[in-house]
């Protein structure tokens, strides 16, 4: 019986670890993906600081570029091209939405940290 409990705990730990790395996204050609801002069940990545200012750390893990777009209430606040194999930080105020738009296949990694209020 102890072996089954240990096995269950190990499987749970592995699943939790695997879910932790869900900040890596495969962007298909002509795809626009909202990264954060729409609400529970619709976010591609969970921003633990969504109720205050935060910083998104975006890393392009591929050779192809993609566009990073920040919106607030439907208006584009900032938009720029993220070149291949580059890393940048984007300031997100409370209520801002982060999008990644790609015309070519690309891979991106997004992490969040607490921003200065």
Image (cartoon, grey):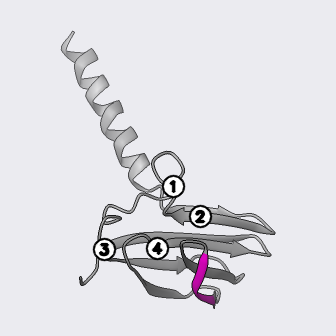
Separation of residues labelled 3 and 1 (CA atoms): 16 Å
Q: Where is 15 relative to 94, above or below?
A: above
Element at label 2:
strand
**Label 2: how many residues lie within 10 Å, few (<14), some (14-19) or many (20+)?**
some
* Foreground disc of the pair 3, 4: 4
Q: Is residue 51 above or below residue 103?
A: above
Residue 90 located left or right of residue 84: left
> Mark 2 = which residue?
34
Point out which mark residue 96 bears.
4
Q: Disc 4 to disc 1, how far (Cα)?
A: 13 Å
Q: Earlier in the sequence, mark 3 or mark 4?
A: 4
| Residue interval drawn in magenta | 75-80
Residue 35 lies in the magenta-colored region: no
The residue closer to the viewer here, 42 or 66, is 42
Residue 73 or residue 99, whichever sits in front: 73
Disc assigned to residue 43: 1
Q: Nearer the viewer, residue 53 or 114?
A: 53
Majority secondary structure in the magenta region: strand
Cα distance in 3D space between marks 2 and 1: 7 Å
């Amino acid at each position: 019986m102890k072996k089954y409990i240990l096995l269950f705990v190990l499987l749970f730990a592995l699943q939790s670890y695997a879910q932790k790395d869900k900040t890596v996204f495969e962007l298909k050609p002509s795809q626009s993906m909202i990264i954060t801002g729409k609400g529970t069940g619709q976010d591609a990545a969970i921003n633990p600081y969504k109720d205050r200012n935060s910083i998104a750390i975006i890393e392009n893990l591929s050779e192809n570029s993609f566009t990073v777009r920040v919106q607030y209430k439907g208006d584009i606040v900032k938009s720029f091209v993220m070149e291949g194999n580059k890393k940048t930080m984007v300031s997100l105020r409370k209520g801002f939405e982060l999008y990644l738009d790609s015309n070519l296949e690309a891979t991106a990694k997004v992490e969040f940290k607490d921003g200065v209020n």
